[in-house]
């Protein structure tokens, strides 16, 4: 009798307890909004209103850092340019953003890892362009051509195929040319590097297959995000040791 009573009491407790919470995922608009809130918070020097997970992890230039320090203290304005890469399957929002630290332009890369509509991880890269720097961004006043165009119906690759194709680009860097790397550039392909067009298949002087490419034998590539709607694969690359090709200490 006591055992039956205890079992009945347990069943009553279970029936009165709250149902387990169901994790909520972010759709494309939700992930884009989180990026907007992040950039706004960064420029305002105030992360307190962001929906952060309790154990949020933050890195700046591949080093663990404290949210609110580093560029959070030095940024002075939003430069107006932003290119998003939204990966709904992995719940990742990434972006390239132009910021300012007074008269210094900052090419800012940020990746937000999202879970249950909260930011659980933030990875950032900060590249400063001094006013007298050799290369000044020239094409960051408007969206980068083609990046925001959804893939037409019937022409989408699988996620796996997209990644396979994208990884032929760092393979071309590894071996020193895109022909041997079997990188399949489109007829109108182009490269924007640090805000400057440095290659364009439509320009006979700057076609990618014919450019001299530094050999990067130790390059390491990782897939940061796959925007399946817009047909974009975002890679983060460690160029590795390239001798003194870039100058000592300047490899990416």
Image (spheres, grey):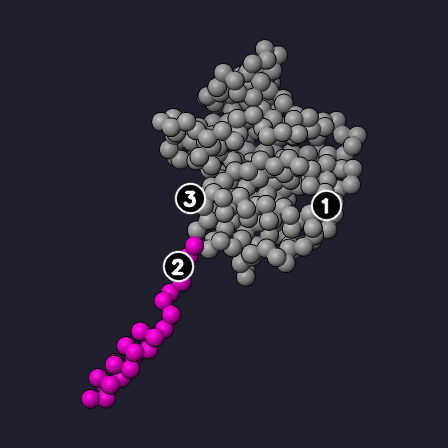
Mark 1–mark 2 Cα distance, whole angstroms, equals 37 Å
Identify the residue shown where x is 49% and y is 16%. 187
Q: Which residue is mark 2?
A: 22
Q: Secondary structure at mark 3?
A: loop
50 versus 27 height, above or below: below
Pick whichever of labels 3 and 2 is earlier in the sequence: 2
Q: Which residue is mark 1?
A: 75
Magenta stretch, main secondary structure class: helix
Q: Is residue 161 left or right of residue 202?
A: left
Mark 1–mark 3 Cα distance, whole angstroms, equals 31 Å
Mark 3–mark 2 Cα distance, whole angstroms, equals 17 Å
Instruction: Estimate the x, y position of residue 117 in percent, counting from the top left.
Output: 49, 53
Q: Which residue is mark 3?
A: 89
Q: Which residues are magenta?
A: 1-24
User: Is the Cβ of the residue at disc 3 closer than 8 Å to that at disc 2?
Assistant: no
Q: Secondary structure at mark 1?
A: loop
């Amino acid at each position: 009798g006591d055992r039956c009573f205890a079992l009945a009491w347990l069943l009553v407790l279970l029936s009165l307890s709250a149902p387990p919470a169901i994790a909520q995922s972010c759709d494309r608009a939700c992930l884009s909004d989180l990026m907007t809130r992040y950039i706004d918070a960064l420029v305002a020097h105030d992360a307190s209103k962001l929906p952060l997970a309790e154990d949020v992890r933050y890195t700046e230039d591949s080093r663990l850092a404290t949210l609110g320090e580093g560029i959070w203290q030095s940024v002075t304005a939003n430069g107006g340019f932003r290119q998003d890469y939204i990966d709904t399957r992995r719940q990742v929002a990434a972006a390239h953003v132009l910021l300012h630290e007074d008269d210094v332009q900052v090419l800012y890369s940020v990746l937000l890892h999202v879970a249950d509509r909260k930011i659980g991880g933030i990875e950032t890269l900060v590249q400063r362009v001094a006013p007298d720097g050799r290369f000044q961004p020239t094409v960051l006043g408007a969206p980068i051509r083609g990046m925001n165009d959804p893939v037409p119906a019937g022409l989408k690759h699988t996620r796996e195929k997209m990644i396979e194709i994208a990884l032929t680009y760092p393979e071309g860097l590894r071996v020193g040319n895109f022909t041997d790397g079997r990188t399949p550039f489109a007829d109108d392909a182009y490269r924007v590097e640090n805000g400057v067009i440095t290659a364009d298949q439509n320009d006979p002087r700057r076609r990618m297959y014919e450019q001299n490419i530094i050999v990067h034998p130790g390059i390491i590539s990782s897939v940061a995000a796959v925007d399946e709607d817009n047909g974009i694969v975002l890679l983060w690359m460690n160029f590795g040791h390239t001798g003194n090709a870039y100058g000592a200490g300047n490899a990416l």
